[in-house]
Amino acid sequence: MRNRWRHAAQALAISLLTSYNATAATLVHIEAAHDDGRYTLSFEVLLDAEQGKVWRQMTDYEQLPRLSEVVSQSRVVKSDGADKHRVDLTFHACILIFCKTMKKVVDIQAWPRSDIIVIGDPTLSDFSYSVERWRVFAEKSQTRLRYSAEMTPDFFIPPLIGPWLVKSFLQKEIMATAVKVEEFAGRE
């Protein structure tokens, strides 16, 4: 009986290892803070993918749901040239037993292959303030992403455990999204 369990465990381990996606997203830095209702977040991640391919994944605004389990819908509402877009986003996130669907309409300004600024429209969003900055640059055959954001949710977050839960959730979501960006860029 003991051998049967050991063989079953070995078979499971082998199947997990052989089906494991060989992405190598490396988290270089992450910081999250909360002060008076405003959340700030910054991170830096190194992706094992070419910058041009990463850039294409990040600026395909209609396809953002495939990069993040939290983004349930993404629709370009308006485009003003190749580098300015208004995007309607719907997020659905669960933290422990708390689930929330959030809307955010953002104006995105992109500078080809380097910077993306995302500014939320508070009149059409569940955030009274939202500014995000992405920096994308090549490092040999890899791509370094730098991100910073300030957001003020316009909905209730429990004061005692909420900030800790939100920060923890954001940190996990960042790595999951980085791995997806790297994976899709690698498929190009």
Image: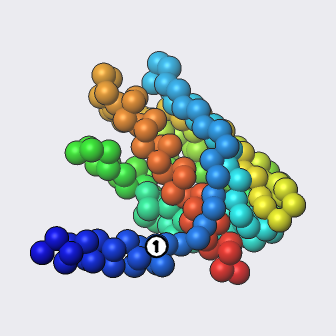
Residue reaching furthest to the top: 36
Residue drawn where x is 53% and y is 27% of the image? 33
Q: Quadrant of residue 63?
A: bottom right
Taking depth in this image into account, of 146 and 15 the one nearest to the observer is: 15
Q: Nearer the viewer, residue 49 or 149?
A: 49
Direction from residue 40 to residue 6 in the image, left or right: left
Identify the residue at horizontal 48%, vertical 78% (top origin): 18
Q: Residues within 10 Å of mark 1 (few under 14, many from 20)?
A: few
Quadrant of the frame with the N terminus? bottom left
Query: In the picture provided, is 44 more to the left or to the right than 167?
Result: right
* Residue at x-position 76% and y-position 52%: 144
* Place of residue 106 in the rendered image (x, y in percent of width and height, measured from the top left): 60, 51
The picture quadrant where one finds residue 147 is top right
- Residue 67: % across, % down: 54, 65
- In the picture of the structure, the residue carrying the numbered disc 1 is 17
At label 1, the amino acid type is Leu
Q: Is residue 149 above or below residue 4?
A: above
